[in-house]
Image (spheres, rainbow, N blue to C red):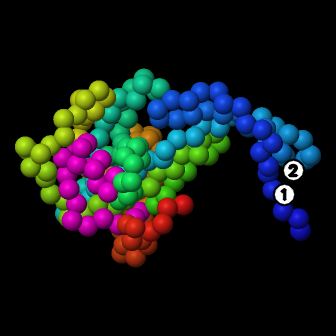
Amino acid sequence: MTTFSHETRSRTPRYAGPIFSVFTDEVTMPGGGVAARDVTENKGAVGVVALDDADRVVLIKQYRHPVHRKLWELPAGLRDVAGEGLAAAALRELAEEVDLVAGRVDLLVDLHTSPGFSNETIRLFLARELSEVPEAQRHVRTDEEADLEIVRVDLDEAVAMILRGEITNASAVGGVLAAAAARAAGWTTLRPADTPAI
């Protein structure tokens, strides 16, 4: 059996910005033709399912302009600090967005967020043994983060929120469901935080 290999014949830049760039690629197709595919490339992201000793997950509600409303999400952010490791970036986001540090961090799951048009990946970590960032050392939140709503929700209730359609952010859905599955497996599916990225 012959395996077809898609080939990019040309690339036309459409937009270049600080967070992402957009291109139109001409790509060979198995039927013999060539098709145009718009592609968004970005730096990737990290996120954290922070689970406290009472089995509650830390959720934030944040305004997202493209959908014109606030969404329930996990603490997360772009991989935009040069030389910063993925776990370190996730822990930085945890501290900046919800004022928490973690004594234990494991790799939970890797996701392609929207592979139909974007190369973005997000690596989600499970953070446990949580403690508060001292008040004097807390990050000053601005822009959309200035009015974050931060709650702790029982992990089973967070799963129910997904199934009721209350949590729709893709990384939050993936992270919460992965955490519930990992817990059901006695945490045996977790990988080391420094596992090489996909």
Q: Is residue 127 above or below residue 27?
A: below
Question: Does residue 73 appear to the left or right of 40 in the view shown?
Answer: left
Q: Residue 80 in the image: x percent, y percent?
A: 40, 44
Q: Is residue 104 magenta?
A: yes
Residue depicted at 32% across the width and 57% down the height = 88
Q: Mark 1: which secondary structure?
A: loop
Residue visible at 36% across and 75% down in the picture: 186
> Label 1, label 2: how many angstroms apart (C-alpha)?
6 Å
Q: Find out whether the residues at labels 1 and 2 contact each other: C-beta distance under 8 Å.
A: yes
Q: Is residue 39 above or below residue 129?
A: above
Q: Locate residue 89, reporting x and y percent.
A: 34, 52
Examine the image and state in which quarter residue 108 appears. bottom left
Query: Left or right: 187 with respect to 2?
Result: left
Where's residue 37, x and y in %? 73, 36
Residue type for callout 1: Phe
For the question of whether residue 46 can be seen, the reply is yes
Q: Quadrant of the C terminus?
A: bottom right
Residue at (24, 44) in percent of width and height = 96
Which sits in the foreground, 82 or 114? 82
Considering only order in the chain, which callout, 2 or 1, is on the residue closer to the N terminus? Answer: 1
Nearer to us in this view, 190 or 54: 190
Amino acid type assigned to the residue bearing label 2 in the image: Pro
Using the image, determine if residue 28 lies above or below residue 24: below
Q: Residue under label 1, please give it.
A: 4
Disc 2 packing (10 Å; few <14; some 14–19; many ≥20):
few
Instruction: Classify 10 as above or below 183.
Output: above
Residue 30 is marked as 2
Span shown in magenta: 88-108
Q: Where on the picture, by quarter, is residue 28? A: top right
Count residues near mark 1 (Cα–Cα under 10 Å), then give few for <14, some for 14-19, many for 20+.
few
Where's residue 86, x and y in %?
39, 57
